[in-house]
Structure formats: structure tokens, C-alpha cells
Amino acid sequence: MSDSYMIGPGAHELAALNALADRKNEGAQVLAILALASAVNRLANA
């Protein structure tokens, strides 16, 4: 799958917040990194 098909950073951010609420810190970190990667990819495509 191409990086162009990543979901928006907002969805990853929401998932990271939910993971934090569930005390799943490592998962929240991964989701936060995915949000950053998605945002960078969208900027690169702009």
C-alpha cells in the first residue's frame, strides 16, 4: 500500500487519545507517530 492511502492525522490522534485513556501508553506512542507521519506525507504531497 502506498503512503498516499494513509488515513488522516486526526483519526490517529483520536485513537492515540483513546489509547491513553485506556492506559495503553506504548500503543498511544505508536499512534502519535503515525499521526506525525501522515501529516508529513500530506505536506509533502501539497
Image (cartoon, grey):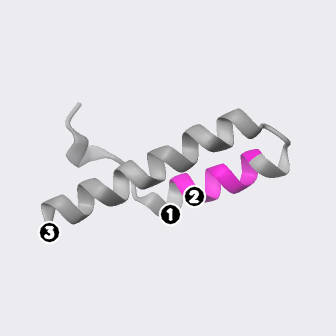
Q: Position of residue 41 (x, y in %)?
A: 25, 54
Mark 2 touches mark 3? (CB < 8 Å): no
Q: Amino acid at mark 1?
A: Gly
How many dots with numbers?
Answer: 3
In the drawing, does residue 45 fall left or right of residue 1? left
Distance from label 3 to label 1 (Cα)? Answer: 17 Å
Rate crowding at label 3 as few (under 14), some (14 to 19) or many (20 or more) other CA atoms within 10 Å.
Answer: few
Tag 2's secondary structure?
Answer: helix
Q: Residue furthest left?
A: 45
Q: Amino acid at mark 3?
A: Ala
Q: Main secondary structure of the magenta part?
A: helix
Give residue 13's mark: 2
Q: Which tag, 2 or 3, sits closer to the chain's start?
A: 2
Residue that carries the numbered disc 1 in the rendered image? 10
Q: Which residues are magenta?
A: 12-19
Q: Is residue 12 above or below residue 26?
A: below
Residue at x-position 85% and y-position 42%: 23
**In the image shown, does 12 or 40 lie closer to the viewer?**
40
Distance from label 2 to label 3 (Cα)? Answer: 21 Å
Mark 2 touches mark 1? (CB < 8 Å): yes
Residue that carries the numbered disc 3 in the rendered image? 46
Q: Position of residue 36 (x, y in %)?
A: 43, 54
Q: Position of residue 14 (x, y in %)?
A: 62, 58
Q: Is residue 28 above or below residue 10?
A: above
Rate crowding at label 1 as few (under 14), some (14 to 19) or many (20 or more) other CA atoms within 10 Å.
Answer: some
